[in-house]
Image (cartoon, rainbow, N blue to C red):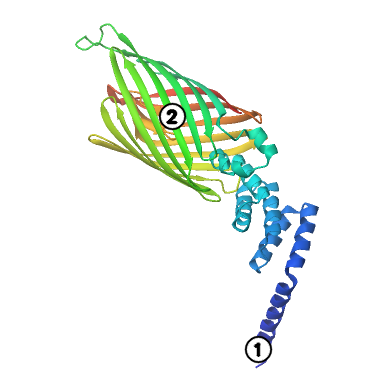
C-alpha cells in the first residue's frame, strides 16, 4: 500500500509539473523569452527552446523566424529551411523567409532551387541578381593532362569551357564545349610484331546542353543532350546521348533518378543511375554522394558504384575524394556532362579534388585522378593512367 501511495504521488507531481510547463509556455511567455534569446545571440538555446515551445502548441510566425535565423547563424542551413518553409505555410509572401531560403539554397550549392525565391526578394537584392530576362550567371574553364606508363598510349589532353544561364526563376541552362585528343600506337594489320609501328590519333570535339526546370521548391526535372564528334585515324563517328532525370531535395539529403540513352560508335548503349546526396550537418562542411549505375549494350551489361566524400578543411578550402568501382567503357558522369569513352576499358578510377575559394565569385579547382585500364588488344595487360586537372569557375 505504501508503494502505491509513492507511485500515485510521483504521477501527480509529474502531471502538475507538465501542467505548469504548458501554462508557463503561453504565447506571451514564449514571445518574450525567444526574443530575449534572439537579442542575446544564444542561437542553440533559442533553437532548443523554440522546439519545446512548438511541441507544446506554441507555434507562431515570429518564433519560426527567430528559430530559422538561429539555425542560419549556426550554419545549419537545412534546419533553417525547415523553419522558414513553415513560415511560408502561414504567410506565403513573407519576404524575410523567402530571402533566407534563397541564401540557404545558395550556401547548399542548390542555386537552381534558390532561383525560385527571386520573385519575392526585395528590390535591393534583385538589383544585384538581375532577375529579369536572359542572364549569364556563371562560366567555367577546365583543363586536364593525362600520362601513362604504356608505350602504346600517348599523353591525353582535355579542354572544357562552360557557361551557365538563367531564364527567369524556374529554368536554367548549362552549355559547354570540350576537346579531347590522344595518340595511339598500333602494329598495322598483317605486319610482323617487330615491324613498323603506326601512330594514329583520337580527336574528339563535344557539345553539351542541359536544362533544369524547377517543378516545385523541392522537385527538379533535368534534360540534357551530349554530342561527340570522334575522329580516329581515317574514321569519323557521330555520337549522340540524351539524358533525363528527376531530383528530389529533402532537408539533409537529395535523391536523383536518371537515365541515358546513347549511340556511341554505331552501338546503342543505355545507362540508368540512382544517386543519393547527403549533408548531415545541414551545410557543406561535410557531404557525400553515392551513385549506383547499370549500363547495357549489345551482349554486355555492367554495374558501377561511385562514392564521393567531401569536407571543408580550411576557410574557403574543400577537399573531395572519389572512387568508381567496376569495369566500364562509354560511361557518362555528372548529368551526362563528362564522357569516358577511351578504347581501353577502365578497371578502377579514383582521385582527389580540392576547391579553393579565391573570392566570393571565383573558385579554383585542382585535382588528381588515378585510373587502371585494360589494354584493348590484350585485356590481361593492365596499365595505369595519371591525370592532373585544373579549373576556374566564376559566378556573375
Residue extending farthest bottom: 1
Q: Earlier in the sequence, mark 2 or mark 1?
A: 1
Q: Which residue is mark 1?
A: 3
Nearer mark to the viewer, of 2 and 1: 2
Q: Which residue is mark 2?
A: 209
Secondary structure under the numbered disc 2 in the rendered image:
strand
Quadrant of the snapshot with the C terminus: top right
Residue at the image point whose x is 30% and y is 20% from the top? 237
308 relative position to 88: left or right:
left
Please give the label number shown on residue 250: none
Q: Position of residue 23 (x, y in %)?
A: 73, 74
Q: Is residue 144 above or below residue 355?
A: above
Sort mark 1 into few (<14), some (14-19) or many (20+) by Cα contacts within 10 Å.
few
Q: Position of residue 121 (x, y in %)?
A: 65, 43
Residue at the image point whose x is 33% and y is 28% from the top? 240
**Residue in front for this viewpoint, 56 or 348:** 56
**Residue in front for this viewpoint, 68 or 193:** 68
Q: Position of residue 192 (x, y in %)?
A: 22, 9
Residue extending farthest left: 190
Q: Is residue 323 above or below residue 25?
A: above
30 relative position to 207: left or right:
right
The total number of labels drawn is: 2
Sort mark 2 into few (<14), some (14-19) or many (20+) by Cα contacts within 10 Å.
many
Amino acid at each position: 500500500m505504501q508503494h502505491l501511495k509513492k507511485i500515485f504521488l510521483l504521477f501527480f507531481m509529474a502531471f502538475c509539473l507538465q501542467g505548469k510547463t504548458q501554462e508557463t509556455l503561453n504565447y506571451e511567455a514564449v514571445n518574450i523569452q525567444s526574443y530575449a534569446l534572439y537579442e542575446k545571440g544564444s542561437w542553440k538555446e533559442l533553437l532548443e527552446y523554440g522546439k519545446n515551445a512548438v511541441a507544446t502548441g506554441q507555434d507562431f510566425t515570429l518564433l519560426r523566424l527567430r528559430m530559422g535565423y538561429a539555425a542560419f547563424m549556426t550554419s545549419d542551413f537545412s534546419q533553417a529551411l525547415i523553419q522558414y518553409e513553415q513560415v511560408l505555410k502561414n504567410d506565403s509572401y513573407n519576404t524575410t523567409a523567402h530571402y533566407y531560403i534563397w541564401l540557404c539554397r545558395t550556401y547548399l550549392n542548390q542555386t537552381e532551387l534558390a532561383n525560385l525565391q527571386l520573385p519575392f526578394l526585395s528590390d535591393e537584392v534583385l538589383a544585384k541578381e538581375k532577375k529579369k530576362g536572359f542572364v549569364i550567371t556563371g562560366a567555367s574553364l577546365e583543363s586536364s593532362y593525362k600520362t601513362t606508363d604504356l608505350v602504346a598510349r600517348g599523353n591525353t589532353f582535355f579542354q572544357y569551357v562552360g557557361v551557365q544561364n538563367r531564364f527567369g526563376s524556374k529554368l536554367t541552362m548549362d552549355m559547354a564545349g570540350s576537346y579531347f585528343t590522344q595518340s595511339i600506337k598500333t602494329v598495322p594489320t598483317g605486319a610482323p610484331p617487330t615491324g613498323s609501328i603506326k601512330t594514329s590519333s583520337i580527336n574528339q570535339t563535344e557539345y553539351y546542353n542541359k536544362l533544369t526546370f524547377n517543378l516545385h521548391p523541392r522537385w527538379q526535372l533535368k534534360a540534357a543532350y551530349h554530342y561527340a564528334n570522334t575522329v580516329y585515324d581515317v574514321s569519323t563517328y557521330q555520337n549522340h546521348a540524351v539524358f533525363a532525370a528527376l531530383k528530389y531535395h529533402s532537408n539533409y539529403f537529395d535523391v536523383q533518378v536518371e537515365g541515358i540513352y546513347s549511340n556511341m560508335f554505331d552501338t546503342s548503349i543505355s545507362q540508368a543511375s540512382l544517386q543519393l546526396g547527403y549533408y548531415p550537418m545541414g551545410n557543406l562542411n561535410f557531404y557525400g554522394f553515392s551513385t549506383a549505375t547499370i549500363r547495357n549494350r549489345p551482349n554486355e551489361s555492367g554495374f558501377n558504384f561511385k562514392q564521393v566524400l567531401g569536407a571543408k578543411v580550411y576557410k574557403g578550402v574543400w577537399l573531395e575524394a572519389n572512387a568508381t568501382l567496376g569495369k566500364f567503357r562509354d560511361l557518362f558522369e555528372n548529368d551526362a556532362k563528362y564522357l569516358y569513352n577511351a578504347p581501353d576499358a577502365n578497371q578502377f578510377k579514383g582521385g582527389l579534388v580540392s576547391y579553393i575559394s579565391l573570392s566570393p565569385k571565383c573558385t579554383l579547382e585542382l585535382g588528381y585522378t588515378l585510373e587502371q585500364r585494360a589494354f584493348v588488344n590484350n585485356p590481361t595487360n593492365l596499365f595505369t593512367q595519371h591525370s592532373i586537372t585544373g579549373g576556374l569557375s566564376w559566378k556573375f
